[in-house]
Amino acid sequence: MASQEGSARRVAELDTPAFLVDFNKVSTNCAKALAQCTELGVTLRAQTKTHKTIEGAVLQTGGTRRGLVTSTIQEAEFYADNGFDDILFGFPFIPHHMPRAAQLTRRLEKFHVMVDSRVAVDVLVANTPPPGKTWSAYLAVNCGYNREGVWWESSEGEELACLMDKSPSVTFAGVYVHCGNSYSASQPRDVERVREETIERLLHLVGRIKARGVACPVLGIGSTPTCSHPGPSMRQLTELHPGNYIFYDAQQMVLGSCKEADIACCVATRVIGHYPDRNQLLIDCGFSGLTKQGTGQLPSGCCIFRDQPNLKLDKMTQEVGFVNAVKGHLNLDDFPIGCMLFILPWHSCATAAMYPVYHVVEDDAVVAEWRPTRGW
Ligand SMILES: Cc1ncc(COP(=O)(O)O)c(C=O)c1O
């Protein structure tokens, strides 16, 4: 499994703060997502933004190294460099991306960009693709999240699809929605409503595209909340593209996407001080080890202290966290100076991004190190 030569360290030996990945949980989360897609008859095109590692993407693709969506072009290059293929750069394409997209189109069997503007389509149409290739492009659709994408009801979607279809330089791959509005849900029923609304809206646009005589091979939606609440309507799609599910986090737990036991990453931190007059502990994890995502969302602050329900991360400076009791009095002697605590972050994608190395653990053994790619 994950064991790597020379990595017989124990968690207790690590410098802190440290980002820990539970190998068994990550493997289970990835295997479940693949099995769920097989059961629904759709392909999993996993988002890599949460971890940005080779090892994580190998697990997400079930070892095939085929079928990813990345959030940066740098990530797409990193995966191309490491034997992956069928990669979608799932971010609004602009003319500035063209030289790097051309390289990736040349190098890979399948590289796709994502467009949501006439500017992007025009640049694809106007540029000759590498020999034997076309530019493969997904149309990003906005079904209510209101970030990237053409509005599902607008005729812009049909027009951009027709323009791509007409051009000998471009292959219109299909449609892509990231339903990030599922994160505004306050209960699973709201997530399911977003899922149904997104699919209905997307199918409406696809019907209009097809009515113009344009084939739409790929129909993809995804976010971890919607994919963690799958429904039979998803069988009408061809692709799902969640990403956060590889680690999950406190936010996904609150949204009902997972249980606390499924959260596959945490930050190890140490107690660095006792302040009895204010009944407070300090820890060596501040906002540069956790981020401030989720501040004020939980009784325990922006995170959960694993197995310590009465600890609250009250505030953070760059390198220091201030820990109080959620309720009542904290017995500081229960948390000796130097002892380790384990924090489940609110948003694992953001927290992981703070670390140049992830320590992969099985129980309290450090069995591997994963090194994420960084940059844009
Ligand atoms: C374009 C795009 N696709 C897919 C995803 C994956 O969604 P999630 O993080 O909810 O799994 C994201 C996440 O931000 C995204 O921005």
Image: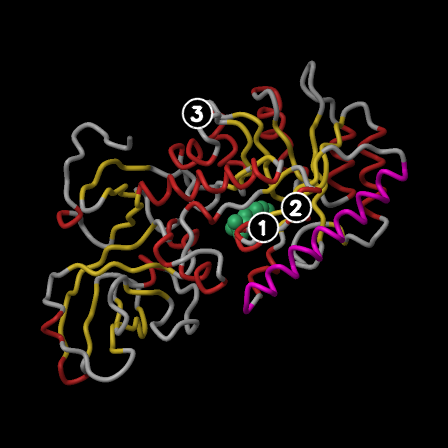
Measuring from the top left, give residue 275's x and y in whole percent: 14, 78
Q: Mark 2 belongs to which amino acid?
A: Met
Q: Main secondary structure of the magenta part?
A: helix
Assign the N terminus to one quadrant of the image: top left
Q: Position of residue 232 (x, y in %)?
A: 65, 48
Residue 341 x %, y %: 21, 61
Sequence order check, earlier mark of 3 and 1: 3
What kind of element bears circle 2?
helix
What residue is drawn where x is 58% and y is 30%? 100
- Determine whether, in the image, residue 319 is placed left or right of residue 194: left
Q: In the image, what residue type sits under mark 1?
A: Pro
Instruction: Please give left or right for residue 216 compared with residue 211 in the image.
Output: left
The residue that label 2 is drawn on is: 234
Which residue in the structure is indicated by mark 1? 230
Badge 3: residue crowd in 10 Å (few <14, some 14–19, many ≥20): few
Residue found at x 15% / y 44% = 10
Q: Compare residues 86 and 322 and report the one nearer the observer.
A: 86
Cβ–Cβ below 8 Å for labels 2 and 1? yes
- SS assignment at label 1: loop
Q: Is residue 273 magenta?
A: no
Q: Residue at x 71, y 57 (%)?
A: 197
**Mark 2 close to ligand 1, CB under 8 Å:** no
Nearer to us: label 3 or label 1: 1
Residue 311 picture quarter: bottom left
Q: Is residue 3 above or below residue 255?
A: above
Vertical position of residue 338 compared to residue 65: above or below: below
